[in-house]
Image (cartoon, rainbow, N blue to C red):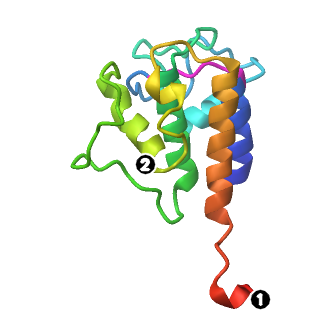
């Protein structure tokens, strides 16, 4: 089921703009009609806490998102996919936060740190270094590719000495 949600999430992240605002506690957004082609994916990801929408109860799927908003959504999706497995590293507030650009808003800082510390995005990724700009298709593709590669890497165990001939 989680792998189906991974596919749905990748399609949803790639096709829609995700809101990274405060959690409003609703799964159905007032601006996503039930008959919209992405309504089921948006609702499922909202139910899982990946999408949270805006405080006014909207999703704003037609709105362009910043790279920081994309980073927050990627971190939430990674945390959801990781549930029940060996956990990814959680941001350590005692560690140097020098990776976080000065311009990064407070609501995105833990996500930026999470993505970097878990090797989901490299520290020089424009999603981390230039997050106030709008995310491009290339940003979405690069970040989804990096996220998928990281989960595949975590799934495939390193060969032990007995496995190497």
* Residue in view at x 74 percent, y 48 percent: 4
Decide which of 154, 16 is in the foreground and name it: 154
| 108 displayed left or right of 44 | left
User: Residue 161 location, x and y as percent?
Assistant: 64, 87
* Residue in view at x 56 percent, y 22 percent: 18
* Residue in view at x 38 percent, y 52 percent: 90
Q: Is residue 88 above or below residue 130?
A: below
Pick the quarter of the image with the C terminus.
bottom right
User: Which residue carries the number 1 mark?
Assistant: 165
Q: How many marks?
A: 2
Q: Residues within 10 Å of mark 2 (few under 14, many from 20)?
A: some
Q: Is residue 120 above or below residue 139?
A: below
What secondary structure is marked by label 2? Answer: helix
Disc 1 or 2, which lies upstream in sequence?
2
The answer to if 135 sits in the magenta stretch is: no
Q: Is residue 49 visible?
A: no
Q: Residues within 10 Å of mark 1 (few under 14, many from 20)?
A: few
User: Residue 148 location, x and y as percent?
Assistant: 67, 46
Which stretch is magenta? 15-20
User: Which residue carries the number 2 mark?
Assistant: 117
What secondary structure is marked by label 1? Answer: loop
| 162 displayed left or right of 22 | right
Please tell me whether mark 1 or mark 2 is closer to you in this view.
Answer: 1
* Residue in view at x 47 percent, y 31 percent: 72
CA gap, disc 1 to disc 2?
33 Å
Q: Is residue 86 visible?
A: yes
Pick the quarter of the image with the N terminus.
bottom right
| 1 displayed left or right of 102 | right
Quarter of the figure with residue 45 = top right
User: Residue 103 location, x and y as percent?
Assistant: 33, 18
Main SS of residues in magenta: loop
User: Residue 50 location, x and y as percent?
Assistant: 53, 36
């Amino acid at each position: 089921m989680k792998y189906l949600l991974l596919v749905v999430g990748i399609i949803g992240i790639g096709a829609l703009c995700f809101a990274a605002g405060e959690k409003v506690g609703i799964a159905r957004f007032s601006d996503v009609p039930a008959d919209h082609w992405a309504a089921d994916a948006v609702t499922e990801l909202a139910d899982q806490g990946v999408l949270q929408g805006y405080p006014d109860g909207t999703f704003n799927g037609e709105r362009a998102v910043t790279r920081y908003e994309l980073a927050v959504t990627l971190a939430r999706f990674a945390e959801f996919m990781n549930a029940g497995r060996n956990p990814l590293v959680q941001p350590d507030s005692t560690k140097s936060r020098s990776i976080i650009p000065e311009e990064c808003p407070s609501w995105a800082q833990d996500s930026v740190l999470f993505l970097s510390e878990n090797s989901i995005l490299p520290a020089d990724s424009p999603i981390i270094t230039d997050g106030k700009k709008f995310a491009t298709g290339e940003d979405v593709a690069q970040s989804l590719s990096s996220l998928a590669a990281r989960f595949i890497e975590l799934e495939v165990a390193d060969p032990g000495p007995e496995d190497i001939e």
